[in-house]
Amino acid sequence: MSTSRCEQTPKLGRWQGGAPVRARGTCVAGYGSMQRPTGAGTRPRVLIVEGDRLLREAIADALRVSGYGVRTAVEGPQAAATLRREAIDVVLADLDMAGRGYGDLARALESLPHVGVICLAGQFTTEAKQWSDALRAAARLVKPLTLTALLRHLRGLVRQGRSQRTQGA
């Protein structure tokens, strides 16, 4: 099986697998054939916290095509504000921009135990590991990553969070 690769800057990483698709100038491979999330009627909501506009938009586009509701934030304080006003199932936080207000995000997540967290990084340095622990990340994914792997983790966290909300109600 051949793998299509999209040439991008190392900071953006590469999405691998499937045929490449252009999403606002950034190549995101293979997201047209992904399974849609299943669950309790409403579209699962993902909050993407990513400082790089092109990568943030590419991930958002890929998740929307895959059936997710998406909100985006550039840094922690903006993400924390979104969590306070909207129902979010999973936070996807890029730790390559660690130190940009992730304390605010960690405090907002303390009162939302049903919200799952996935952390992304090009490399999990000691600082990135500490932030992923502070954010209580269920998964640490290293860039470059495949959309298939990301969607697998998202589906699991959405199911887990909805189960926790149902048990808590």
Image (tube, rainbow, N blue to C red):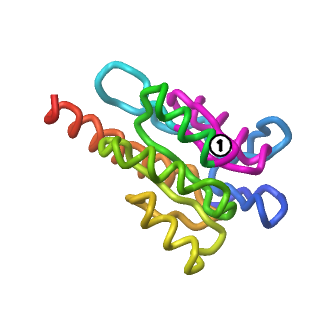
User: In which quadrant of the rendered image does the N terminus lie?
Assistant: bottom right
Total number of numbered labels? 1
Taking the spot 46% from the left edge, 36% from the top edge, the residue there is 35
In the figure, residue 144 lies in which quadrant?
A: bottom right
86 to 150, vertically: above or below = above
Taking the spot 77% from the left edge, 50% from the top edge, the residue there is 52
Residue that extends furthest to the bottom in the rendered view of this protein? 126
Query: Which element is circle 1 on?
Result: helix
Mark 1 nearby-residue class (10 Å; few <14, some 14–19, many ≥20):
many
Taking the spot 21% from the left edge, 40% from the top edge, the residue there is 164
Rendering coords of residue 66 (x, y %): 54, 33
Relative to 89, is 165 on the left or the right? left
Relative to 42, is 54 on the left or the right? right
Q: Amino acid at mark 1?
A: Ile
Rendering coords of residue 24 (x, y %): 82, 35
Taking the spot 50% from the left edge, 73% from the top edge, the residue there is 129
26 to 1, vertically: above or below = above
In the figure, residue 25 lies in which quadrant?
A: top right
Relative to 58, is 158 on the left or the right? left
Rendering coords of residue 110 (x, y %): 36, 49
Reply yes or no: does residue 143 show up in magenta.
Answer: no
Magenta residues, as a range? 47-75
Relative to 164, is 154 on the left or the right? right
Q: Circle 1 sits on which residue?
A: 59
Reply yes or no: does residue 62 show up in magenta.
Answer: yes
Rendering coords of residue 53 (x, y %): 78, 44
> Which of the pair 163/83 is nearer the observer?
83
